[in-house]
Amino acid sequence: MISLDVSCNLCGQSNFTVLEEDQPPFRVLKCNHCSLIFVYPRPDHSELIGHYNEDYYVDWIGTQKDKRIRMWEKRLDKLKGFRSGGRLLDVGCGEGLFLHLAKENGWQISGTELSSYAARYASNSLNVDIFYGEILDAGFPGDFFDVVTMWHVLEHVKDPKAYLKEVRHILKPEGLLVIAVPNVNGMVMRIAYRIAKRRRLKLFSKEEKEVHLYHFSADTIRAYLEKTGFECLRLSPDFGIIEGSKKLINIISVIPYFIAGIKIFNSIEVYAQLKEE
């Protein structure tokens, strides 16, 4: 157990256990109070953003496009079970394919994106201004959006609590928040990785293509929602995987959930709404 000059983003406590050590000074810490897992110190912002250049999106807009369309169509169909239309903001919208399908289905769309390349690409393809930067700096009006989506975004940001508070501000009172994040308790995928790669899957490496600053469990994502004024409507497995081998592993990993409620699937999908005051 160590004490550092940093407080947990979720609970505010300052006692941690070191789970991993990467190239100094980076360590992966687990809060001894709420069990949130995160990287400390955070890598330089410019280095993180540098990962998401044109090369990162080549497969998304090329060989993977048809599979990604099917993935987004399924997510959009599920969203329709909660809300049928209105203003939709996709935070971290990437190349804009989800927003494109939402627009075709009658939604009034907006997006934010930290990658300058992806923001330009999405703006041009959608003929809609995509805000280049963080949602905290976008200046959206309060009580404005019917739905805000964050598909595998929250694990990449420096302050998840601030993001959720901002979403609470810009959502209408009856609005809906949709989040998908990797599950730090996705044991089946970790076991499969160890067998295939013959090494342990690390929680953090500065050299990874996608650097995760936070690692959420079902408990910690629920706690974040509670602390920022949301109530969870549904927490379930996220099936947004397009790679064949990983898709099969994820299907296997959800079986314990449907049989006994055991949450060791690869990723978490959450639907939430504002708590009534």
Image (tube, helix red, strand yellow):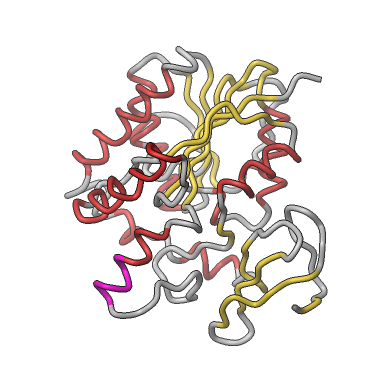
Compared with 175, 156 (above or below) is below
Image quarter (top left, top right, bottom left or bottom right) of the C terminus: top right
| In the foreground, 15 or 127 | 15
Relative to 24, residue 163 above or below = above
Q: Position of residue 158 (x, y in %)?
A: 65, 58
Residue 102's spot in the image, x, y percent? 38, 23
Q: Which quadrant of the figure has residue 22?
A: bottom right
- In the rendered image, the residue lying farthest to the front is 260
Q: Residue at x 53, y 29 (%)?
A: 234
**Near-viewer residue (124 or 90):** 90
Q: Can residue 196 be found in the magenta stretch? A: yes
Q: Is residue 137 visible?
A: no
Lateral position of residue 42 relative to residue 102, left or right: right
Q: Is residue 166 above or below residue 146?
A: below
Q: Quarter holding the N terminus?
A: bottom right
Write down the region rendered in magenta: 192-197
Q: Residue furthest bottom?
A: 24
Q: Is the magenta region chiefly helix, strand or loop?
A: helix
Residue drawn at 60 percent across, 72 percent down? 43
Seen in the picture, residue 223 relative to 26 is either above or below; the reply is: above
Q: In terms of depth relative to the viewer, which is nearer, 25 or 81? A: 81
Whether 41 is among the magenta residues is: no
Locate residue 183, reporting x and y percent: 48, 53
Image coordinates of residue 44 in percent, x first then y, are 60, 71
Residue at 66% over, 59% down: 36
Residue 106 visible in rendering: yes
